[in-house]
Image: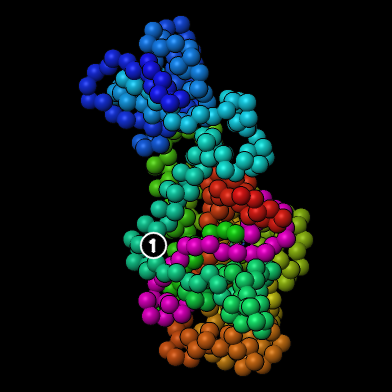
Amino acid sequence: SATKKGVYYLRFNSGDNLSKYQGWVKNIRKLKSFVFIDLVDSLTPQIFQVVVPKNGFTPEDLRNITPGSSIQVIGTHSNTIGKTNKRDIHPKEIKLIGKCSQDTYPLRHATIYSNDYLRKYLHLRGRTDLFRSMNTLRSETSYAIHTYFQKNRFLLTHPPIITSMDCEGAGDLFRVSQANSEDSFFREVKHLTVSGQFHLEAIACGNSKVYSFGPTFRADKSHTRRHLAEFYMVEAEVAFCDTIQDVTMVTEELCKYVINIVLNKWDSLQQLFTEGNCLDREKREQLKRILQNPFIAISYSDTLDLLDSLNIDIKWGDDLHSEAEHALTSHFNCPIFVTNYPAGLKPFYMLQDDVSNDNRKTVSCFDLLWPGLGELAGGSLREHRVRRLEGAMSAKFNTSPSSESSLDWYLDVRRYGGVPMGGFGLGFERLLQAMTGMDIRDTIPFPRFYKSCNH
Ligand code: 4AD
Ligand code: MG
């Protein structure tokens, strides 16, 4: 072995066909005649066990090869995976790339840290198996989402992030531009998007079946396990769509397609995450069960009767609180589409159902409730008749429609060759929660929520 400018090189004799392995040391075990270095390889990626013969170096050589440090190994690896789930590397050369001070490294202990603790180190938690697996799950799930839509001939599109539309009218907005001030970029109030739906509708009237998958912002001042201020939403919009079942069908197919792909891949990824895995065995069994049966569809009004029999009293017109949602999903033990909510509970753009005998106004919409989570997705048919939409808008905004000029283009989409449309939005982090059961703050690398925008 030799030292070059503070970098350690350990050299051993080894066979030909040398490969290069670069990664982070997970663990190092010193036994009688060998030292074993567990290496998370960044390129392959997989876990290797570097088998270092003790006679080839002095303890000093290995001093800086500690958990968390990064090394490069030149050597050969065995083709079989041992009992430890790792492939052996027989090194010819080991080079320290980056030291990791054991005095201060927050993840220096081999124990599994609590998720609360790891949230203080968002920039480092990706070194743990749990968060490497979550980041991998995010990537695999994103890929599966795109694959589903592309296979089904949906066109990927990009609604704007900065907008004056407040499609949901539900919560607070993040402003990016103020009105009428000299230094205001747009000279008008603009904010970060809460949903790309209105823009998707416009694009669907031209490309028929479209989807987007991008960041969405809501200034919810709440601390819950399922709300973020910045999250990713999958949205789809279909022109010439005139039954809500067509929308729920796409939503269900998407969920099942994605979960199936992820479960299939996960078996091969399993060996990567030996110390903590976001997709545990129990969850996988639950997901497999969910894949086997159709989701249930039940109207809002029918859920009230059912809830009544479960001793939960909700008056017609009141929203289903989370306890009620939980009771419903537990009762059926599967995902449920609750359809046809009272119009008063939903945004103005939803298509009104024909008014029933009892004069209760409902809309053609659904919320997809997921066991153990609550709302995973929401969708509806859109009001495509200009007069009706104008009526809904003036009722909502308490103005004549023409004075809501920022929404005039939305009416144009109907005025000029408008068609029946339907679509939905699905929270990407909620989908990851549905798959893993983890807190929403642990499904995205750098979570933003009320009073928290660290890193
Ligand atoms: O139900 P929402 O508000 O529906 C819409 O925005 C529609 N315009 C979508 C459409 O039809 N194109 O949001 C859709 C989904 C919710 O079901 C939920 O999964 C997720 O987005 N979501 C959130 N996820 C994380 N943090 C938040 N603060 C969220 N708010 C909504
Ligand atoms: Mg909703």
Which quadrant holds residue 300?
A: bottom right
- Estimate how packed mark 1 is, as few (under 14), some (14 to 19) or many (20 or more) residues with alpha carbons within 10 Å: some
Q: How far across and down, in percent of the image, does residue 227 sit?
A: 65, 56
Q: How far across and down, in percent of the image, does residue 352 sit?
A: 59, 80
Queried on whether the Cβ of the residue with tag 1 lies below 8 angstroms from ligand 1, the answer reads no
Q: Nearer the viewer, residue 300 or 266?
A: 266
Q: Nearer the viewer, residue 360 or 423?
A: 423
Residue 325 in sight: yes
Under mark 1, the amino acid is Phe
- The colour mode here is rainbow
Q: How far across and down, in percent of the image, does residue 267 sit?
A: 41, 36
Which residue, as the protein is rendered here, is positioned at the far front?
A: 5
Q: For this view, does 148 lie left or right of residue 200?
A: left
Magenta-span inclusion, residue 214: yes
Q: For this view, does 378 lie left or right of residue 251?
A: right
Mark 1 lies on a secondary structure that is: helix
Q: Is residue 27 above or below residue 33?
A: below
Ligand 1: which quarter? Answer: bottom right
Residue at (59%, 69%) from the top-left corner?
192
Residue 373 in sight: no
Magenta-span inclusion, residue 60: no
Q: For this view, does 307 lie left or right of residue 407?
A: right
Q: How far across and down, in percent of the image, does residue 391 sit?
A: 63, 89
Which quadrant holds residue 152?
A: bottom left
Residue bearing the label numbered 1: 149
Residue at (56%, 75%) from the top-left corner?
163
Residue at (29%, 23%) from the top-left corner?
76
Q: Nearer the viewer, residue 66 or 366?
A: 66
Quarter of the rendering occupied by the N terminus:
top left
Residue at (48%, 49%) from the top-left corner?
138
| Residues rendered magenta in the picture | 201-229
